[in-house]
C-alpha cells in the first residue's frame, strides 16, 4: 500500500487550501492507494468521513489527527477516533500515555522544523516513527531526524504534509501490508516502522 499519512484539507485545517474532494482526487492522480486525514487538532466525524469515502471508493481514506503538544511540537496520531481523548496543547506525557493505552500509533511530525534542538521532555518520549520526508522537512533537518530515529529506535516515514492538491503524494510511504482500519494501520506503525519504504514522488530513485 502506497500511503500519504499526513494530509490536511480546508474542511478542518485553517491552513488547508483545497477541499477534501480535491485532495482525494489529487491522491488518486498521484497513484496513491490511501491517505490519512490529519487535520490540526481535529478528528473527522464518522458520518462526514463515510460520505467522503463513498465518493472515492478507489482510495482508502483513514482518519487521524495532528496534535499540537504543550511544547509546540506536532504529532500525528493514528488509531484514536474519540475526539475527547485528544486536544490542543496536551502535555506530551499524557499524549503518549493515551496513545499507549489505546494501542494507537504516534509519529513525530517534521522534527526540528522550528529549531535545531528538541526539548529534553520530547527526547525522553519514544514515538513509533519520525517524519523524514515532507514538504515541511528541509534537507538540513534530515541528518538530525535520522539521528533522532536511532535515538528512539524507531522507523522513518515520508508524507506530503499536503495542504493543497499540488503537494499530495509528493512524498509517501509504502507499507509491508494492507491495513483496512485505523487500528490495523496503527499496528503496522507500532510493529513494522523499521521496514517502511520511503518514496520521493518527485524522484523515485531517492527513496530509502
Image: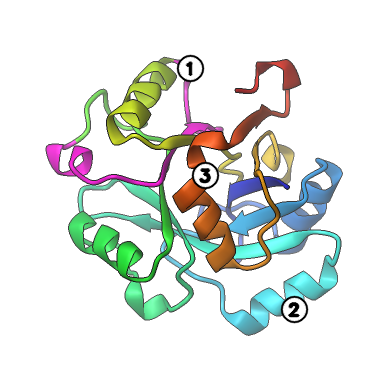
Q: Look at the numbered discs 1 and 2 and tell me whether their residues touch, using CB distance below 8 Å.
A: no
Instruction: Give x and y (percent) for residue 94.
Output: 21, 64
Q: Residue at x 34, y 75 (%)?
A: 85
2 or 3: tag closer to the N-terminus: 2
Label placed on residue 26: none
Left or right of 144 in this view: 124: left
Q: Is residue 89 above or below residue 158?
A: below
Q: Which residue is mark 3?
A: 192
The reply to whether residue 9 is in sight is: no
Q: Residue at x 85, y 44 (%)?
A: 29
Between marks 1 and 3, how big is the CA–CA gap?
25 Å
The reply to whether residue 33 is in sight is: yes
1 or 3: tag closer to the N-terminus: 1
Residue 52 lies in quadrant: bottom right
Label placed on residue 139: 1
Between marks 2 and 3, how big is the CA–CA gap?
31 Å
Instruction: Give x and y (percent) for residue 44.
Output: 56, 73
Q: Residue at x 28, y 58 (%)?
A: 96
The residue at the far bottom in this view is: 47
Instruction: Give x and y (percent) for residue 97.
Output: 25, 63
Residue 129 is inside the magenta segment: yes
Left or right of 118 in this view: 108: right
Q: Which residue is mark 2?
A: 51
SS state under label 3: helix
In front: label 1 or label 3: 3
SS state under label 2: helix
Instruction: Using a 10 Å C-alpha cutoff, classify the residue at mark 1 as few (fewer than 14 neighbours), some (14 to 19) or many (20 or more).
Output: few
Q: Is residue 65 above or below residue 81?
A: above
Q: Nearer the viewer, residue 139 or 95?
A: 95
Amino acid at each position: 500500500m502506497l500511503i500519504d499519512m499526513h494530509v490536511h484539507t480546508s474542511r478542518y485545517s485553517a491552513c488547508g487550501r483545497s477541499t477534501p474532494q480535491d485532495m482525494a482526487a489529487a491522491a488518486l492522480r498521484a497513484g496513491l492507494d490511501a491517505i490519512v486525514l490529519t487535520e490540526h487538532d481535529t478528528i473527522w466525524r464518522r458520518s462526514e468521513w463515510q460520505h467522503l469515502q463513498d465518493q472515492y471508493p478507489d482510495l482508502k481514506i483513514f482518519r487521524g489527527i495532528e496534535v499540537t503538544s504543550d511544547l509546540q511540537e506536532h504529532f500525528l496520531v493514528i488509531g484514536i477516533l474519540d475526539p475527547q481523548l485528544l486536544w490542543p496543547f496536551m502535555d506530551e506525557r499524557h499524549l503518549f500515555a493515551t496513545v499507549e493505552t489505546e494501542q494507537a500509533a504516534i509519529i513525530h511530525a517534521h522534527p526540528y522544523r522550528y529549531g535545531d534542538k528538541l526539548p529534553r521532555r520530547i527526547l525522553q518520549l519514544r514515538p513509533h516513527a519520525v517524519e523524514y520526508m515532507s514538504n515541511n522537512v528541509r534537507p538540513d533537518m534530515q541528518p538530525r531526524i535520522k539521528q533522532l530515529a536511532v535515538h528512539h529506535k524507531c522507523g522513518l516515514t515520508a508524507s506530503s504534509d499536503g495542504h493543497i492538491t499540488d503537494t499530495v503524494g509528493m512524498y509517501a510511504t509504502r507499507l509491508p501490508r494492507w491495513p483496512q482500519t485505523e487500528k490495523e494501520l496503527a499496528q503496522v506503525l507500532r510493529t513494522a516502522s523499521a521496514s517502511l519504504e520511503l518514496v520521493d514522488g518527485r524522484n523515485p530513485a531517492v527513496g530509502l
